[in-house]
C-alpha cells in the first residue's frame, strides 16, 4: 500500500503549455499573412529607463518576434508630461495600419503601456485613454465592467487571469460548480480572475489580508488561485487533498547559496503542496510564461477583428 | 433557561430606515434650494404601456415629490425605434438645467430608463448611451468596472446593492473581515452587491444555480444576501446562528386566502430564519423601500456634483 507521503501532485508545466499556445498563435499569424497579406502589430510604450521595465519589454518583444507579431517600441523620456504621453497614446489609437513588413501590412492591434509610469503621471488616466479596441492588457475599467457582468464580454481579458484559466483548461481541471478560492484581490490578478471563474460557473470566494481565518476557507477549495504576493504563505496543510493549485506569486527571497543571492518562490509552499494537491504550477515556469502568451493571443484576437471582417 | 425556540431575530425595518433616509434627503434638498436656488431633477423614461412599469414609475415619482426632487416623465410609444430612443437619451444627457420650479432651477441630475424595454430595442445599447454623470441606476459597465476595481469609485452605486449595505450599516452590522455569502449573481443585485461587500473588506463568496452544496456554504456566512429569485429556498437550518440576513427576493406565490390570490415572499423562509438569525429583513418592507430611497440619494448626489463645485 502506498503511504500518503508518496503522493506527488502533477506539476503543471506552464512553460510547455505557453510554448504550445505560441505555436498555435504563430500558425494563425502565418495564415493571416498568407490569406490577407496582413500581420498583427503591438506597440509597446515605455517611459524612462527602469531596468526591470526594459527587461519585461525585451521579453515581450522577443515573444512577439517568435510568433510573427511585429512589435515596436515607443521609448519616451522620464520627463515626458502626462499630456504629451496621452497624445502619444491617441496617435497610436488612431493608427490602423503601421507599415509594410516583408510584404505584409502590419495592423496595429494592441497598445501596451509598460507600468509603472513615473510618479508625476496618473496611470489610471493614461490607461483609460487607450482605445478599447487596442487595450490588449484588458485593464480599462469598461473592459473590467463587461468582464464582471453576466451576458457581456470584454474585448480583451486581462492576460494573467486569462492565463490562469487556460492552465486549468489545458490541464483538464473542470471549473463548473467547483469551489474556487482566490487569495488576493488586486486589479490585475485577484479581482479579474475571480470574475472569470464566476463566469465559468465556479462558486467563488475571494480572501484577502482583511479576511479572518483564511486557512480554513482555503482548505475548502477545489481550485486555489494564489495571488497575494506573500512568499510561501499557503502551507501544505491548508490545501484540500487533490485540489488544483495555481500559484501566481513571484516573490524574491534571500538565498545565499545562489550566485544572485536570491531565488523566486510563489505564494504557496511548493514542496509541501506537492504532497497534497492534485496538480500545481511551479514558480518560476508556471503562470509567468502564460502571461506573455496571453498578451500575444490578445494581440492576435484584436488583429483578427480588424482583418477578418 | 430560555429554550432555543424562544430566540427571535431582530427584524430590520427597511421601511422605517428608508423613511429616515428620505427625511435626510429632503433636508439636503431644502438646503440646496435655499443656498443655491437649485433643486435636483430626475428624468424617468418609460416606453410603452406596461402596467407594472407604470406602477414602478408612479412609486418613484411619488417618492421624488416627497423629498423635493423634481421628476418628470418622458412617455414614449411602444413603437419607438432604438435610434429615436437613443436620441431622446442624448437630449437628456445634454440638458443641464431643465426649468424653473417654485423659483428654483431644476438641475437634471439623473436619467432613469425604466426596464424592460420592448423586444425590438437593445437595452444594453440604450443604457450605455446614458451619460455617466446621470446614470443614477449605476448600471453602466464603466460604473460596474470602477465598482469592481480597487482604489476606483463609480460615480453611482447601483440602488439595490447600495440599499443592502446601507441596511447593514444602519443596523450596526460590521462587515470588515466577516464572511459574506451572496446567493445569486445577477447584474442588478448579486454581482454588484458582492463587489460592494468586497470593497467593504468582507470575505465574499458568490453561490448560484450552478453551485454544488449551496446549503453548507450559506451556513458559514455571517452575512447572507439572498438574491436568487427562488421563493423561500433558504431554510432556517441553512443559517448560522446570529447571522445577518438581507432578503432581496420578491416572489409572488399563490395564496387563496388572499383577495389577490397571491402574496409576496422572499428567498428566505422568514419564519424559520427568525428563530436562528441575528437580524433579518422582511419581505415586503425590507430591501424594497431602500431601492427607491437609494435612487433618490443617487439623484441628490449627482445634483450636488453639479451645484456644489
Image (cartoon, coloured by chain):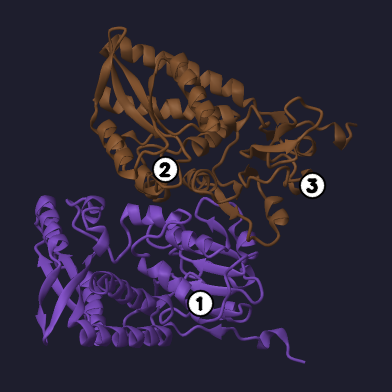
Chain colours: A purple, B brown
Quadrant of the image containing the C terminus of chain B:
top left
| Earlier residue among tags 3 and 2 | 2
- The image's mark for residue B237 is 3
A104 sits to left or right of A56: left
Of residue B253 and residue A126, the one placed in the foreground of this image is B253
> Is residue B177 at all visible to an observer of this figure?
yes
- The image's mark for residue A252 is none
> In terms of secondary structure, where does tag 2 sit?
loop
Q: Which residue is mark 1?
A: A169
Q: How many marks?
A: 3
Residue A202 on image: x %, y %? 57, 63
Q: Nearer the viewer, mark 1 or mark 3?
A: 1
Relative vertical location of residue A215 with respect to residue B53 in this rendering, above or below:
below
Q: Are marks 1 and 2 on the same chain?
A: no
> In terms of secondary structure, where does tag 3 sit?
helix
- The image's mark for residue B139 is 2
Residue A258 on image: x %, y %? 36, 84
Q: Nearer the viewer, mark 3 or mark 2?
A: 2
In whole angstroms, how far apart are the C-alphas of marks 1 and 3? Answer: 36 Å
Residue drawn 52% across the image and 44% down it? B193
Amino acid at each position: 500500500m502506498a503511504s500518503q507521503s508518496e503522493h506527488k501532485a502533477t506539476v503543471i508545466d506552464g512553460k510547455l503549455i505557453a510554448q504550445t499556445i505560441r505555436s498555435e498563435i504563430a500558425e494563425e499569424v502565418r495564415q493571416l499573412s498568407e490569406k490577407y497579406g496582413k500581420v498583427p502589430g503591438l506597440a509597446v510604450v515605455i517611459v524612462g529607463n527602469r531596468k526591470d521595465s526594459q527587461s519585461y519589454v525585451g521579453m515581450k518583444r522577443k515573444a512577439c518576434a517568435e510568433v510573427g507579431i511585429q512589435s515596436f517600441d515607443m521609448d519616451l523620456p522620464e520627463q515626458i508630461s502626462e499630456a504629451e504621453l496621452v497624445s502619444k497614446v491617441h496617435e497610436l489609437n488612431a493608427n490602423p495600419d503601421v507599415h509594410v513588413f516583408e510584404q505584409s501590412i502590419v495592423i496595429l492591434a494592441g497598445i501596451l503601456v509598460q507600468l509603472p509610469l513615473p510618479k508625476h503621471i496618473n496611470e489610471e488616466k493614461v490607461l483609460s485613454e487607450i482605445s478599447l479596441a487596442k487595450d490588449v492588457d484588458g485593464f480599462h475599467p469598461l473592459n473590467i465592467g463587461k468582464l464582471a457582468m453576466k451576458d457581456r464580454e470584454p474585448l480583451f481579458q486581462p492576460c494573467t487571469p486569462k492565463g490562469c484559466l487556460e492552465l486549468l483548461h489545458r490541464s483538464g481541471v473542470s471549473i463548473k460548480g467547483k469551489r474556487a478560492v482566490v487569495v488576493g484581490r488586486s486589479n490585475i490578478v485577484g479581482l479579474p480572475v475571480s470574475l472569470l471563474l464566476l463566469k465559468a460557473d465556479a462558486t467563488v470566494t475571494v480572501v484577502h489580508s482583511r479576511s479572518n481565518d483564511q486557512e480554513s476557507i482555503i482548505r475548502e477549495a477545489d481550485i486555489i488561485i494564489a495571488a497575494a504576493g506573500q512568499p510561501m504563505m499557503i502551507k501544505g496543510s491548508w490545501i484540500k487533498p487533490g485540489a488544483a493549485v495555481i500559484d501566481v506569486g513571484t516573490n524574491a527571497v534571500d538565498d545565499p547559496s545562489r550566485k544572485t543571492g536570491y531565488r523566486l518562490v510563489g505564494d504557496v509552499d511548493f514542496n509541501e503542496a506537492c504532497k497534497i494537491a492534485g496538480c500545481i504550477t511551479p514558480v518560476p515556469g508556471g503562470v509567468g510564461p502564460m502571461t506573455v502568451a496571453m498578451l500575444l493571443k490578445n494581440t492576435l484576437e484584436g488583429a483578427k477583428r480588424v482583418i477578418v471582417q
